Amino acid sequence: MTQITSQIGTVPYLVTHRGGNNVWHADEPQAEGGGDTGPAPFELLLSALGSCTAITLRMYAQRKGWPLEDVDVKLSLEKTTTGTAIDRQIVLHGALSAEQRERLLQIANACPVHKTLTQPIAITSGLAAL
């Protein structure tokens, strides 16, 4: 199970996240009333998918002994009247064959965050005691 805590104080829209030994922040752009001191929530969502994609591809290529040097993942999110669309463009660097590149694209679609985002998600909310 993955767990984090998110806390907002008196600074408008600045949220502090804690998970494991790590602390990071989210904020809104200045145009939205924030201080622009960290990524906005949807940027954090996209970064989770981008991180998972890159890590999964690196792990798979290492296990196969393939010459994958670098991975660039470019993501965008657009909210439409029918839902949300995420575009993910992957650039693979290295002397990879066409078959290896195609297999890595298949593996990218199997990264855990991609699987989570493309399956139904249940979110339960409740108020916790102080």
Image (cartoon, rainbow, N blue to C red):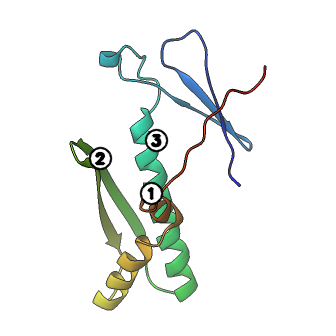
CA–CA distance between discs 3 and 1?
14 Å
Mark 2 lies on a secondary structure that is: strand
Name the residue: 31% across, 67% down: 91
The answer to whether 111 appears left or right of 90 in the picture is right
Quadrant in the picture for residue 103: bottom left
The residue where tag 1 is placed is 117
Indicate which disc, 3 or 1, sits on the residue closer to the N terminus. 3
> Residue 77, which numbered label?
2
Contact? badges 2 and 3 (CB < 8 Å): no
Which amino acid type is shown beneath numbered disc 1? Leu
Residue 115 x %, y %: 47, 65
Cα gap from disc 2 to disc 3, whole angstroms: 11 Å
Q: Please report whichever mark, 2 or 1, sits nearer to the chain's N-terminal start.
A: 2
The extreme right residue here reads: 130
Q: Helix, strand, or loop for circle 1?
A: helix
Identify the residue at image location x=36%, y=23%.
29
Does 128 sit above or below residue 90?
above
Tag of residue 125: none
